[in-house]
């Protein structure tokens, strides 16, 4: 019971769920980038994701991963606030950590809000709603004709980039991969991944938004 309630176990669970979500992001970005290459290619990939039983099963694993990641993040944040005197926290936080690490819970919750909006507009429509368009590709295109949705989408992925910037290397550290020889490379890789994810998803949304203005 002590192990289950320990902050060490919470950090490990949060790290492993975070690494799983990072792998999902890489796959999701790859498939979404197909929209810039070919509508047919994206529709085929989307159809495969929607009909493959392994992928369908992994959706539930992904949902569990999100819940665990969020729950552990909130618990650890509350635990750290209780353990740290407020005066010390105010005086030392900026000196000892970057903006990304100090605001992980804020960026995480804001990204969660966007995720709910995104699932409502895309996943829910495809799975349970009345699909108003002829293909998944057309749904994506139409969503990004809305300037507010496009702005929210870009803003959310900027926040996600900050979240990943710290979360990537923190996840490896939590599972014991923390060495003077490897940590700098992991930090560099994490920052590069955060930039690629932010720019990649933002590029897709801005491309279709500005394309809609010229039509």
Image (spheres, rainbow, N blue to C red):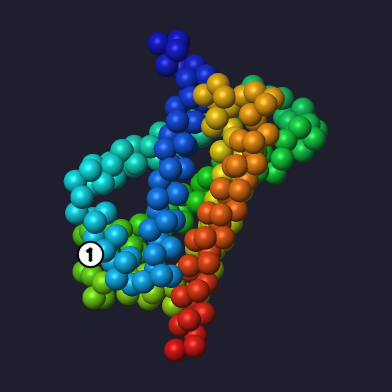
Q: Is residue 96 visible from the viewing direction of this image?
A: yes
Return the x and y of residue 149 as percentages of the image width and height. 47, 69
Which of 103 and 158 lies nearest the eye of the viewer? 158
Is 70 rendered above or below residue 28? above
**Could you tell me which quadrant the N terminus lies in?**
top left
Return the x and y of residue 43 as percentages of the image width and height. 28, 66
Which of 90 and 120 lies nearest the eye of the viewer? 120
**Could you tell me which quadrant the C terminus lies in?**
bottom left
Q: What element carries label 1?
A: loop
Is 201 placed left or right of 126 in the picture?
right
Q: Which residue lies furthest to the top in this view?
A: 2
Is 79 rendered above or below residue 196? above
The image quadrant of residue 137 is: bottom left
Is 205 placed left or right of 93 in the picture?
left
Residue at left offset 19%, top offset 54% = 51
Return the x and y of residue 133 as percentages of the image width and height. 26, 75
Residue at left offset 46%, top offset 36% = 19
Residue at left offset 45%, top offset 30% = 16
Residue at left offset 65%, top offset 23% = 179
Q: Quickly name the residue at label 1.
A: 129
Is 129 placed left or right of 67 in the picture?
left
Is 1 placed left or right of 98 in the picture?
left
Which of 155 and 24 lies nearest the eye of the viewer? 24
Q: Is residue 82 visible from the viewing direction of this image?
A: no
């Amino acid at each position: 019971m002590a192990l289950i309630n320990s902050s060490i176990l919470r950090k490990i669970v949060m790290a492993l769920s975070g690494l799983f979500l990072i792998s999902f992001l890489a796959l999701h970005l790859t498939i979404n980038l197909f929209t810039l290459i070919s509508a047919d290619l994206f529709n085929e990939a989307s159809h495969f994701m929607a009909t493959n039983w392994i992928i369908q099963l992994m959706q539930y694993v992904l949902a569990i991963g999100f819940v665990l990641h969020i729950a552990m993040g909130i618990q650890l944040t509350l635990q750290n606030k209780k353990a740290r005197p407020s005066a010390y926290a105010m005086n030392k936080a900026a000196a000892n950590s970057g903006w990304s690490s100090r605001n992980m819970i804020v960026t995480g919750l804001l990204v969660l809000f966007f995720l709910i909006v995104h699932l409502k507009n895309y996943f829910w429509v495809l799975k349970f709603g009345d699909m108003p368009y002829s293909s998944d590709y057309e749904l994506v295109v139409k969503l990004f004709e809305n300037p507010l949705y496009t702005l929210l989408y870009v803003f959310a992925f900027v926040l996600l980039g900050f979240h990943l910037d710290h979360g990537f290397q923190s996840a490896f550290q939590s599972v014991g991969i923390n060495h003077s020889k490897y940590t700098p490379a992991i930090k560099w890789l994490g920052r590069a991944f955060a930039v690629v994810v932010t720019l990649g998803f933002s590029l897709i949304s801005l491309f279709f938004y500005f394309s809609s203005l010229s039509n």
